[in-house]
Amino acid sequence: MTPLTATQERTLLALSILGLLVPNGVFLWVAFARPAALEAALRNPAAAVFIAEAFFLMFLAAWLVGRAGLRRPGPLAFVALSLAGSLAFSVPLTLWLASRDARKA
């Protein structure tokens, strides 16, 4: 991978932090403040389709991470980051790490 500019790297890091805080913050708020709403969403067939699509895209992106030869975080760690945060967190973080590694090489 060709290293990104410093501005692009800072933008990716900011997007990663935003992706970690915003979707997770909303999810955690709903999970603790309105658990009935979370239960209703999990029983909704339309929501299940979007959840399945997110898992499909997560595994596809993990395969692409491995195929691109990115060793940090690597495909398995990418899946773990996606499950812990979201794709809005793991994708920019992976690109940020890859650019930093490319700059060091």
Image (tube, helix red, strand yellow):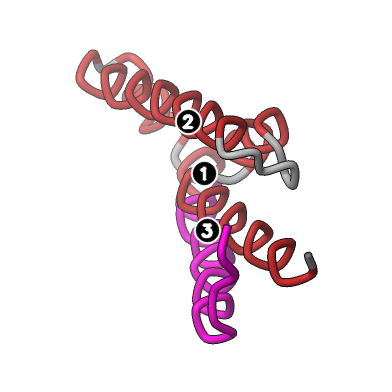
Residue 73, image x, y percentages: 72, 44
**Residue marked by disc 3:** 92
> Residue 76 shows which numbered tag?
none
Secondary structure beneath dot 2 equals helix
Residue 32: which quarter of the image? Answer: top right
Q: Is residue 73 above or below residue 43?
A: below
Towards the viewer: 39 or 83: 83
Q: Give, as a three-letter code, the residue at label 1.
A: Ser
Give the magenta-colored segment's residue range: 1-28
Residue 94, image x, y percentages: 61, 52
Local packing at callout 2 (Cα closer than 10 Å; few below 14, some 14-19, many 20+) is many
Instruction: Return the disc, 3 or 2, that comes first in the chain's sequence.
Output: 2
Give the CA distance from mark 3 to mark 1: 10 Å
**Residue marked by disc 2:** 58
Which of discs 2 and 1 lies nearer the camera? The answer is 2
Residue appearing at x 65%, y 31% in the figure: 75
**Residue marked by disc 1:** 86
Give the CA distance from mark 2 to mark 1: 9 Å
